[in-house]
Amino acid sequence: MFGRFLIVFCLAFLGASSSSSAQKVTTPEGVRILQNKSFDDSERARREILEAFKDLRVTDVCDGMDLIGLQDVGLMDNSIRPLWRDVENFTHRFVGFAITVRHVPSDVRQGQNSFGDLTGFLKFKDGQYSRTPDAWLRVARPGDCAVIVVPREHALVVAKYAREIHEGDERHRARRYERLGRPLDETVIDK
């Protein structure tokens, strides 16, 4: 008897729930935890920024950031270096836009990559946590200008001041070369 009552009750419950499920189902709006800053990402704006940073030295850009109050912002970790160095023609220099990609391994299950005891963890920690594995991710955001990491919203102002510093330095060094009787080289001749 109890079994029949339970079956009848379940069928009645299912019938009642199916009539209420006929209502329109909507997906709730997501919550944006991190707000994206909007900026002009057109091809024209990107070309303008790249042209503004063309041939600037990292030191000039760093000084330009200092001038607008961004001291110690955007400095890269010393372990980040070019794969090659061309001290003759400086072809290892480049300017571009940061793209941040977050890679999440899809095949790691809960409990994998863990340690059976504290000794194993301490050995791992000494080798891994004594240095920052990906130091530049602290400061770079998508769209940032990466001569050093220049926040996108300040890129053109920083480039303007960096250009003034760079050109002033070239003029000063050219005068010094002339006083010393040295021939001018590519570091003091306008390109």
Image (cartoon, helix red, strand yellow):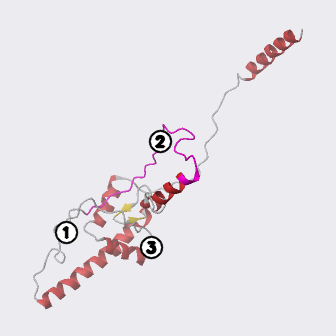
| Residue that label 1 marks | 87
Q: Secondary structure at mark 1?
A: loop
- Dividing the picture into quadrants, the one containing residue 74 is bottom left
How crowded is the residue under tag 2: few (<14 C-alpha within 10 Å), some, or many (20+)? few
**Does residue 3 appear left or right of residue 115 in this picture?**
right
Q: Sequence-wise, which precedes: disc 2 or disc 3?
A: 3
Q: Secondary structure at mark 2?
A: loop
Quarter holding the N terminus is: top right
The amino acid beneath tag 2 is Pro
Residue 77 location (% of width, % of height): 40, 66
| Image point (43%, 57%), residue name | 134
Q: Sequence-wise, which precedes: disc 3 or disc 1?
A: 3
Q: Is residue 86 magenta?
A: no
**Dot label at residue 72:** 3
The amino acid beneath tag 1 is Val
| Image point (43%, 64%), residue name | 151
Residue 136 location (% of width, % of height): 42, 61
Residue 72 location (% of width, % of height): 44, 73
Give the Cα distance between marks 1 and 2.
Answer: 39 Å
Give the Cα distance between marks 3 and 1.
Answer: 26 Å
| Residue that label 2 marks | 105
Q: Is residue 109 magenta?
A: yes
Instruction: State the extent of the magenta-drawn residues as a range.
Output: 93-119
